[in-house]
Image (cartoon, rainbow, N blue to C red):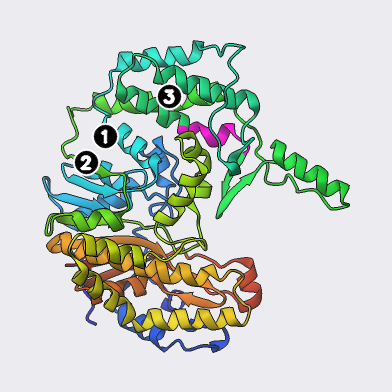
Amino acid sequence: MKEVNLFNYTDIAVNIKDWKVDCFSADNKYPQDERKAIEEKYWAITEITDKFNRQSVSFQLSKKDRMQRWLKYKEGFSAELVRTLIKDFNVTPGQTILDPFMGSGTTALVSCMDGMNSVGFDILPMSKVAINAKMSVFEYDLKELETVFQEVKKIEVPSNFVKETPYLTITKEGYPLKTAIEIEYFTEYFAGSKHSDNVKNLIKLCILNCLEPVSYSIKAGQYLKWDTRCPRIQRVNQKRISEGKAPLTSKNNKQIISGFREELIKELSNVISDIKIIQQKNISDLHGRCKFFEDSALLGMPKMEANSINAVISSPPYCNRYDYTRTYAMELAYLGVDDNRLKELRQELLSCTVESKTKLDMLRNYYNEIGRIDDYNKIVEVINNNRTLTEIISALEKRNQNGEINNKGVLRMVKGYFTELTFIFAEIYRVCTPGSYVGFVNDNVRYAGEVIPVDFLTTQLAEQLGFKPIKIYTLMQKKGNSSQQMAKYGKVSLRKSITIWQK
């Protein structure tokens, strides 16, 4: 494939062998011809770049962006990345940018600030709170915010108030008792206040951002971890000691568990400071408009008008077993999600955990209901005819038969992940105007010694649907493997890439 030099970035001297995969199957144990074929095919449009880095495609730079830090959403990417892609995609004011996985709303906010409209979906309720708060930045009354700030300093929790903030089974006793009561009292106090709805929502967002530092919980890896000062962990350790076992260590404990009022004051102070600075600029409003849908893109996008989108900038959940419903369990519980709804959310999210079940029957019924069963069949045909995905699933099945995969849900997750993304890509193709660019951030992964080139496989699926592959930017910084995989199969550096396609 001829290389397309759409974007002019500075060339850097690299040894491509450091990023190109020579062996996709550890010990060359299972067929890898299809993976090698797409590696060769798409390497012609791959560029190792220092234009982007792991900070720009993660939450790290967003910490420095005003408003982006309002929700600590670790899976988000930076405003700088969005600005760069908007410029490179030649999107102009008045046009519309889509983000099927909106998260904390970085794509939406940057788009609207620069005069573009935004449309997006996200099923997690934190997104709605964050996006509404950010989109109201020019509507806040600074005097009202100052009143709220002073109220937070003075509020006293009555001694007879003993109601605790809601919890899930997995978050029970997740806060010191005093903190759990304070969170609930402050929440009820402001919900029943005469403050504007925008300010009430902003307070809710600030409280959401306080939950981790004031709790025993620690966001780490695929699940929440717990400080050993948590009563549940203390009981576990007492039992372990009584059974002659070593207690769970405190090496990952927090240095300090913040007080709730102290943390809320800090959050409000930062937010109010950001709002003052932004409102002082010569901007009276967001130039663009945002349409946010608290829904799965799998169900929402099929209802969108064809040829109505001018660009797409997004980052889907990665195929890495990361369970958002557990990692953000404290926030979900605070927003009223109960155990049953938590299980439903886990299944409604894009398949990226070992508990994910196939959505094909649901999608078939849905497409049939909306009169688009022929489109469903065409998308499934693309999936079934993708020989690279077939090769990967076959290799994983054999590894599983050999007992090399510690959870058979990995197979279901991988197949479901690429199946659902193909439906997303098909709908993106339908709703985009001809010539539109699409940018996706994603990570390559490895299971049981089998490398899955997510960047090239998704590009191949997109091409099967009609997209023209334009460029694949691979970050200089590479991702490692788990210690278990390296010990058993050796180390393979995994790419993190930004794939660019055009309709």
Q: Is residue 48 visible?
A: no
Q: Is residue 449 left or right of residue 271?
A: right
Specify which label sits upstream in the sequence, 3 or 1.
1
Q: Residues within 10 Å of mark 3 (few under 14, many from 20)?
A: many
Circle 2 — which element? strand
Residue at 15 percent across and 56 percent down: it is 310
Other-residue count near label 1 (Cα within 10 Å), few / some / many at <14 / 14–19 / ≥20 = many
Q: CA distance from mark 3 to mark 1?
A: 17 Å
Between the residue at mark 2 and the residue at mark 3, the CA separation in whole angstroms equals: 24 Å
The x and y percentages for residue 17 are 45, 79
Residue 135 is marked as: 1
Dots 2 and 1: beta carbons under 8 Å? Answer: yes
The residue to which callout 2 is attached is: 290
Magenta extent: 208-216
Q: Position of residue 100 (x, y in %)?
A: 29, 54
**Among numbered discs 2 and 3, the one appearing first in the sequence:** 3
From the viewer's perspective, is residue 282 above or below residue 428? above
Quadrant housing the C terminus: bottom left
Report the front residue among 142 and 100. 100
Which numbered disc covers residue 487?
none
